[in-house]
């Protein structure tokens, strides 16, 4: 590997150190994670900061992701074909169910929101485009994982299944039992598993090989989005997801 390529590889490793669990890191912490000496890390951090991929707190010396990454993320979302194609269907679901509707994709062990349509009701879910949530504890994540090969799901669950609420599924055995139910119904539900007071129901958008491309979720307050209502909403999301899949297949054809 040439020196310029090695430098790019190392810079990307540094950016990948920043996660939901570790959004702010010192130079020492970064050096420990990437296994590089501090002088090399210091030089790379300086370049990343200059290009605004990272920003450094002048008082503490701690780093966090910079505004340039946010700008690039918005650019990606603006030109995401799937997001544009699915938008009318999300609007239809929002008008039908009057709850927050999200479109998400799987990224590692998390789901990432590509689009969010807020509920028109006063009490609603606080969600934003680009937000990441752990797949194992969300309806969207379960809708993805239920249709992936088991060995891949095992690797994802190996990232950890901490109990986020009293309702969180935190054992792989219970999780795989839940996955069988998701495949049987065609949709997944989450009852206050990620956050107290929030319920959600989701269905996957599948490709021609029956693998998940994305997931559509209806989310709302638990007192309003009761289990019976989620089971009534589920088939409507499945129908929309299938319609989207058919449209994508026709475009490819």
Image (spheres, rainbow, N blue to C red):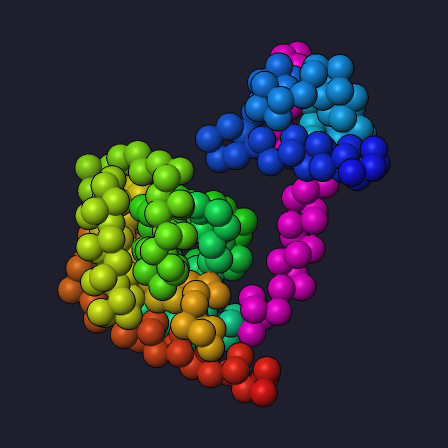
Q: Residue at x 28, y 61 (%)?
A: 188
Q: Residue furthest front?
A: 1
- Location of residue 182 by image quarter: bottom left
Q: Which percent across, then down, holds residue 60?
A: 63, 12
Q: Which percent across, then down, holds residue 13?
A: 65, 34
Q: Residue at x 59, y 82 (%)?
A: 252
Is residue 84 in the magenta section?
yes
Magenta residue span: 58-85
Q: Residue at x 80, y 28 (%)?
A: 47
Is residue 142 in the magenta section?
no
Closest to the observer: 56 or 205?
205
- Location of residue 51 by image quarter: top right
Q: Which percent across, then down, holds residue 38?
A: 70, 15
Closest to the observer: 210 or 6?
6
- Placement of the N terminus among the 4 image quadrants: top right
Q: Residue furthest left?
A: 228
Q: Residue at x 47, y 77 (%)?
A: 208
Q: Is residue 183 left or right of residue 216?
A: left
Q: Is residue 136 left or right of residue 82?
A: left
Q: Is residue 178 left or right of residue 214?
A: left
User: Does the rendering let one see residue 229?
Assistant: no
Q: Which percent across, then down, holds residue 230?
A: 23, 64
Rendered position, 252 above or below 158: below
Q: Main secondary structure of the magenta part?
A: helix
Rendered position, 149 above or below 13: below
Q: Is residue 162 left or right of residue 33?
A: left
């Amino acid at each position: 590997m040439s020196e310029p390529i090695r430098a790019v590889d190392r810079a990307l490793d540094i950016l990948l150190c920043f996660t939901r669990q570790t959004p702010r890191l010192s130079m020492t912490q970064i050096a420990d994670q990437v296994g590089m000496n501090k002088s090399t890390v210091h030089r790379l951090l300086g370049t990343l900061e200059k290009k605004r991929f990272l920003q450094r707190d002048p008082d503490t010396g701690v780093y966090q992701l910079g505004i340039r990454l946010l700008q690039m993320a918005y650019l990606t979302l603006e030109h995401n074909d799937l997001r544009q194609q699915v938008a009318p269907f999300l609007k239809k679901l929002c008008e039908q169910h009057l709850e927050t509707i999200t479109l998400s994709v799987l990224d590692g062990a998390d789901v990432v929101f590509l689009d969010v349509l807020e509920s028109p009701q006063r009490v609603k879910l606080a969600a934003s485009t680009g937000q990441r949530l752990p797949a194992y504890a969300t309806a969207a994540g379960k809708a993805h994982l239920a249709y992936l090969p088991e060995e891949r799901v095992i690797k994802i669950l190996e990232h950890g299944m901490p109990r986020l609420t009293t309702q969180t599924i935190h054992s792989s055995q219970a999780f795989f039992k839940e996955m069988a139910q998701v495949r049987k119904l065609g949709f997944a539900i989450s009852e206050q598993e990620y956050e107290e007071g929030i319920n959600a129901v989701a269905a996957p958008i599948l490709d021609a090989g029956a693998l998940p491309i994305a997931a559509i979720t209806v989310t709302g307050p638990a007192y309003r989005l009761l289990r019976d209502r989620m089971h009534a909403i589920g088939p409507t999301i499945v129908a929309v997801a299938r319609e989207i899949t058919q449209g994508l297949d026709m475009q490819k054809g």
